[in-house]
Amino acid sequence: MDEEERPAFLSASQKAYQEDPEGFINRLAARADALFENGYLAQITGETHVFEVINLGARHKHGYRVNALTGDCTCPFYQRQASGESLTDNGRLIRCKHHRGLPGLVRRTRKALYQANQAKECCELWAHWMKTMTVIRQRRKSPALTRKELEV
């Protein structure tokens, strides 16, 4: 991004990314890997491929909806980018920690549900995740799938 194109005010994310892009991504990845340890759980929603990522460890319980296929998330970090707060020079959106960490969070939540003898919730979460993984595997084999075909 040229000096002329840069906004006068930079958000904390923009500033951190511009100062050290690789470090920013590494810190984001570390936070994604630690979601479960930081009090987050994954829950199913009524929408295929969409999960609720909730933080029970926060002072005020909150959650974000994450589409595992598209990467869309309702968290402020993702929403700011989606509405024009560019971090990268090419304008490509950076996946948030909730989307990056979703696979591990689903596995850890499933394990916790199993250990807590919550078999129904454990199986529902896993079935929801397997529908998503089926589409991901299909996309790897045939990237030109239609929207209808993705609605497994």
Image: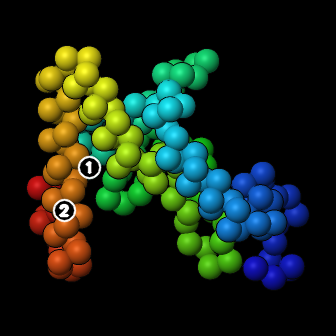
- Residue at horizontal 58 percent and vertical 23 percent from the top: 58
Say which residue label 1 marks.
49
Q: Above or below — where is 14 with respect to 111?
A: below
Measured as percent of width and height from the top left, residue 92 is found at 56, 72
Query: Please, what is the three-letter code of the amino acid marked with disc 2?
Result: Val
Q: Is residue 83 left or right of residue 12?
A: left
Q: Are marks 2 and 1 in contact (CB under 8 Å)?
A: yes
In this view of the protein, which residue sits in the foreground, 77 or 9?
A: 77
Measured as percent of width and height from the top left, residue 148 is found at 13, 64
Q: Above or below — where is 69 with respect to 129?
A: below
Quarter where residue 105 is shown: top left
Q: Secondary structure at mark 1?
A: loop
Measured as percent of width and height from the top left, residue 111 is found at 28, 31
Q: Above or below — where is 140 with respect to 42?
A: below
- Residue at horizontal 62 percent and vertical 61 percent from the top: 25
Assign the N terminus to one quadrant of the image.
bottom right
Q: Above or below — where is 131 with respect to 51?
A: below
Residue furthest toward the front?
115
Between discs 2 and 1, the one toward the N terminus: 1
- Residue at horizontal 35 percent and vertical 49 percent from the top: 103
For disc 2, the neighbor class at 10 Å (few under 14, some 14 to 19, many from 20) is: some
For disc 1, the neighbor class at 10 Å (few under 14, some 14 to 19, many from 20) is: many
Q: Secondary structure at mark 2?
A: helix
Quarter where residue 9 is shown: bottom right
Residue 135 circle label: 2
Q: Is residue 51 left or right of residue 14?
A: left
Measured as percent of width and height from the top left, residue 65 is found at 40, 40
Is residue 116 visible from the viewing direction of this image? yes
Assign the C terminus to one quadrant of the image.
bottom left
